[in-house]
Image: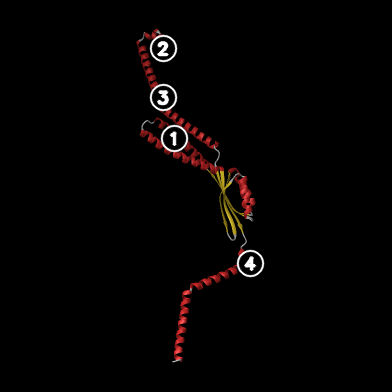
Amino acid sequence: MLALRFFFDEQYRTKPLVWCRVRDNMIKYIAYLTIILCFSMGCQEADAPFADKRFQTEALLTSDQQEQGSENQITEKQARKIIKEAEMGISVEEYSSAVAAIDSLTRRYEGYISKEQERRGDTYTSNELLIRVPNEHFESLMEDISQIAKKVTFKQIEAKDVTEQFVDVQARLKSKRVLEDRYRSLLAKAQKVEELLKVEQQLGIIREEIEATEGRLRYLQDQVAYSSIKLHVRMEKENPASSFFFRVVHAFRGGWEGLVNMSIGIIYLWPFILLGGLWIFFIKQTNRNFWGKKKFP
């Protein structure tokens, strides 16, 4: 304010003392202003890298959050992939009709029997079946088979969540196909024979990996689409050894077998029998000659 009055008021400009004070005040004011401006500019420049770093950090966090959100959306949209497996044992009254009914139920629920192993003994008839049925009919088929059984001896059900494996295999297959496309583009651009051979070699390797991954994906899809039921069917039969008729027949059979075995045993002894007969004949001849000479000298 004093500086402005100095320029516009005539009495200040005509007095040297006043002029010196005004000049000094102006120099101090300009110096203070310069220091304040430099300090503020320096602080802004010093804060700029931190601001950039904060911006980059926020950008990375935002990017990670977006990626995480997209992954969560993919996981939520992805249907759960469940592999269902069961093992059950049943006891039936009539084996043939029970197996036929199980086969009919399997066909009704659009399934099939992939393995069958039958055993027959004196006291039982059993069968071990591996049934593959669409996942949506798994519980219904298990319930209907239980209705056929005279008794359910045991039952075990297991469900495996393979959603993570399924998504992982799909992602790896996608990335390998992208890599295959890149190799094909490099193959088209290659000019030297050596480059062609190297690219074709890598292309063959990635092709094998793609086929293996596709096979793994098909296996998971089949396991998810069709559930497995390992079914043990068993029919108990009356022990024939407890009946009187069987015991009589067994006795006759045993006697005949004993006679045959004895005859065979006697035949095995023919060398001893022959030697014994010759020895007896020799003894008789010797005695006859001895007593004949003694009786008739």
Number of the label disc, if any, that sits on residue 83: none
Residue placed furthest toward the front:
296
Identify the residue under disc 4: 245
Question: Toward the viewer: 247 or 48?
Answer: 247
Who comes first in sequence, dot 2 or dot 1?
2
Q: Within 10 angstroms of label 4, few (less than 14), some, or many (20 or more) residues?
A: few
Secondary structure beneath dot 1 equals: helix
Q: Which residue is drawn at 53% across and 35% down?
A: 74
Secondary structure beneath dot 4 equals: helix
Alpha-carbon distance for marks 3 and 1? 51 Å
The amino acid at mark 4 is Phe
The amino acid at mark 1 is Glu
Number of the label disc, if any, that sits on residue 180: 1
The amino acid at mark 2 is Leu
Who comes first in sequence, dot 3 or dot 1?
3
In this view, the mark in front (4 or 2): 4
Number of the label disc, if any, that sits on residue 4: 2
Q: Where is residue 173 in the image (x, y as percent from the top left)?
A: 47, 37
Who comes first in sequence, dot 3 or dot 2?
2
Tell me whether the residue at label 4 lies in contact with that at label 2, contact meaning CB atoms closer than 8 angstroms. Answer: no
Q: Within 10 angstroms of label 2, few (less than 14), some, or many (20 or more) residues?
A: few
In the picture, which quadrant includes the C terminus? Answer: bottom left
Tell me whether the residue at label 1 lies in contact with that at label 4, contact meaning CB atoms closer than 8 angstroms. Answer: no
Q: Within 10 angstroms of label 3, few (less than 14), some, or many (20 or more) residues?
A: few
Who comes first in sequence, dot 1 or dot 4?
1
Alpha-carbon distance for marks 3 and 4? 114 Å
Q: Where is residue 9 in the image (x, y as percent from the top left)?
A: 41, 8
The amino acid at mark 3 is Gln
Question: Toward the viewer: 84 or 66?
Answer: 84
